Amino acid sequence: MTTSRPAKSREGWGVFVSGLCEEVEEDDVEEAFACHGTVTSLSLPLNRMTGNIKGYCMLEYSSREEATAAIKSMDGAKLRGQAIFVSWLVQDGPGILEEAATKASETCLKAPGPAVESCMHDRSSDRSRSPKAKSQS
C-alpha cells in the first residue's frame, strides 16, 4: 500500500462516502456524520434520468480532526442497512489513483450484481446490432 496523506481543499477537509443506497437522503447523511463535528458542506449528486442518488456523496468539515474521526468511525458502518465506505476526498502522495482503481476493481469483481450482469448482457446484444455485424450477415 502506498503512503498518502489528506490534503485540505479550498473550503475544508473533504470526505468521500460511497456505497449509499438509493433511499438515502441528505438529512440521513448529515445526521450520521454530525456526531463527529459540524458538516460545513454536503453534496449528494443525483442521477438525472432517475432522480435517485448516484450512490456517493462528498462532505466537508472545517477541521482535520473532525474529518479524521468521521472517516475512522464511519468507514464500514451501515447507513439505512447498507455498508458505506468513507475516505479522504482529496489526497496527496504517490500512487493515489492506482490505489483507488485497484480497490474499486477488487470490490466490483468480488460480487457483480444483477445490474452489472444485465449491463454486460445488453452490451453483447448491442454488438450484434452494430453496422459491421449487419453488413456481414
Image (cartoon, rainbow, N blue to C red):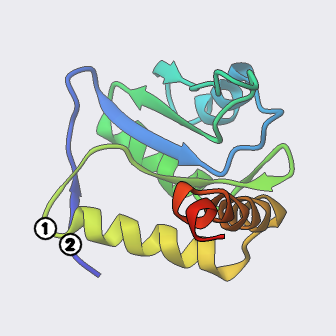
Asked if the residue at tag 1 contacts the one at tag 2, i.e. Cβ–Cβ closer than 8 Å, the answer is: yes
| Direction from residue 74 to residue 71 in the image, left or right | left
Query: Which secondary structure, mark 1?
Result: loop
Circle 1 packing at 10 Å, graded few (<14), some (14-19), many (20+), is few
Give amino acid for label 2.
Thr
Indicate the quadrant containing the C terminus: top left, top right, bottom left or bottom right. Answer: bottom right
Q: What residue appears at the point 65 percent right and 27 percent down from the top-left corner?
A: 47
User: Looking at this view, is 34 or 3 the one in front?
Assistant: 3
Q: What residue appears at the point 50 percent right and 73 percent down from the top-left corner?
A: 105
Q: Quadrant of residue 45?
A: top right
Residue 102 horizontal/vertical position (percent): 40, 75
| Direction from residue 47 to residue 92 in the image, left or right | left
Precedes in sequence: disc 2 or disc 1:
2
Depicted 41 relative to depicted 112: above or below: above
Mark 2 to mark 1 CA distance (whole Å)? 7 Å
| Count of numbered tags | 2
Q: What residue appears at the point 60 percent right and 28 percent down from the top-left corner?
A: 34
Residue 36 horizontal/vertical position (percent): 54, 36
